[in-house]
Amino acid sequence: MLFNGYLRELKKLNELSNRIDEHVQTLVRLKLDIEDKNEKINYYNTPDGIAKLARQEFNLVLPGEKIYILEYYTPEEGPQKK
């Protein structure tokens, strides 16, 4: 009887240990995600970060730069006439 109780408690302890491990892994993953996002926030608060964001999101360019527009088509379509 005492041995069965010991095995039951050992099983509970093992289950709780596994759940703790899962939660720790989740916390580590979330902490890394937060650190990554904080790095991005810090970068985009710099002049270089703002310039990169403006280029990506608003298609802005610096004076003297050229913009190239690439058009593609499938062989069946042929070049598009405008």
Image (tube, helix red, strand yellow):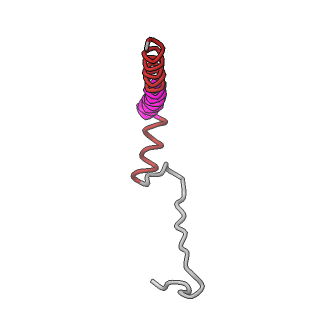
Whether the magenta-drawn stretch holds residue 38 is answered as: yes
Residue at x-position 54% and y-position 64%: 68
Q: Is residue 80 above or below residue 33?
A: below
Report the span colored magenta: 21-47
- Quarter of the C terminus within the rendering: bottom left
Determine the image quadrant of residue 65.
Answer: bottom right
- The residue shown at (53%, 86%) is 77
Quarter occupied by the N terminus = top left
Q: Tell me which corner region of the image, top left, top right, bottom left or bottom right, holds residue 40.
A: top left
x 46%, y 37%: residue: 49
Give the residue furthest to the top. 2
Please identify the residue farthest to the front as the structure is shown.
Answer: 1
- Residue 24 is situated, as x and y percent measured from the top left of the image, at 46, 24
Q: Is residue 12 visible?
A: yes
Residue 46 in view of the camera: no
Which of the pair 35/31 is nearer the observer?
Answer: 31
Q: Relative to the observer, which residue lies in front, 71 or 31?
A: 31
**Residue 13, horizontal then vertical, whole percent:** 45, 18
Image coordinates for residue 66, horizontal then vertical, percent: 54, 58
Q: Residue at x 43, y 32 (%)?
A: 37
